[in-house]
Image (spheres, helix red, strand yellow):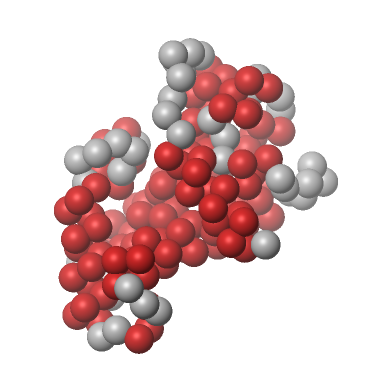
């Protein structure tokens, strides 16, 4: 089940924005993807085990939390059109039962983003995260940031927008 959710989140993060992206509905929907990206950046920073990344990691966490709350509030209040729900919102959010509260959904998204971060790193490492020394893990994480930092949506893009 986790792998299915993980794949749904990865696919959703890769979806391009359509031409109607400037509508308020689309902006509210996009916050779901941005939340996932901010949380993933938070986890990648935390996994580096470098003191200077602690402050940045916390900043990503706070951005993700704020974007997630804004997104879910709009979603629960019906301020996101059905079209935008299907086109923009990460599929995993749409699978959460309506009777679950905002904190439950945010917690689930936070956990899923951690798995996304681990998966990205493990793909580059070619094995289990904890099978490698800290220096090897940090080098891979730095390479991931170097490769992505100036492409949207990225950690840099999330920081600039928030």
Quadrant of the image occupied by residue 42: bottom left
Residue at image location 20% in from the left, 63% down from the top:
142
- As drawn, 3 above or below 99: below
Q: Which of 105 and 127 is in front in this view?
A: 127
Q: Where is residue 159 in the image (x, y as percent from the top left)?
A: 29, 42
Q: Nearer the viewer, residue 15 or 41?
A: 15
Residue at image location 52% in from the left, 22% down from the top:
26
Q: Nearer the viewer, residue 149 or 71?
A: 149
Q: Determine the residue located farthest toward the front in the rendered image.
A: 126
- As drawn, 5 above or below 28: below
Image quarter hosting the C terminus: top left
Residue at image location 37% in from the left, 61% down from the top:
120
Q: Determine the residue located farthest toward the right in the rendered image.
A: 99
Image quarter hosting the N terminus: bottom right
Judge left or right: residue 25 versus residue 50: right
Residue at image location 41% in from the left, 55% down from the top:
40
Q: Position of residue 116 (x, y in %)?
A: 46, 59
Quadrant of the image occupied by residue 157: top left
Quadrant of the image occupied by residue 76: top right
Judge left or right: residue 141 versus residue 27: left
- As drawn, 14 above or below 143: above
Judge left or right: residue 53 versus residue 97: left
Can the viewer see residue 112 in this picture?
A: yes
Judge left or right: residue 105 versus residue 129: right
Can the viewer see residue 103 in this picture?
A: no
Q: Position of residue 122 (x, y in %)?
A: 36, 70
Looking at the rendered structure, the number of numbered marks drawn on it comes to 0
């Amino acid at each position: 089940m986790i792998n299915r959710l993980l794949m749904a989140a990865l696919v959703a993060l890769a979806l391009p924005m359509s031409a109607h992206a400037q509508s308020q509905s689309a902006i509210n929907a996009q916050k779901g993807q941005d939340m996932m990206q901010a949380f993933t950046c938070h986890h990648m920073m935390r996994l580096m085990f470098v003191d200077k990344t602690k402050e940045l990691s916390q900043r990503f966490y706070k951005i993700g939390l704020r974007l997630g709350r804004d997104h879910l509030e709009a979603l629960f209040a019906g301020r996101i059109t059905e079209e935008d729900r299907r086109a923009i919102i990460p599929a995993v959010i749409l699978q959460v039962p309506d009777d679950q509260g905002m904190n439950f959904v945010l917690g689930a998204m936070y956990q899923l983003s951690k798995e996304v971060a681990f998966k990205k790193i493990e793909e580059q490492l070619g094995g289990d995260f904890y099978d490698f020394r800290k220096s090897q893990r940090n080098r891979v994480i730095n390479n991931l940031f170097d490769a992505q930092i100036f492409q949207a949506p990225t950690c840099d893009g999330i920081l600039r927008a928030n």
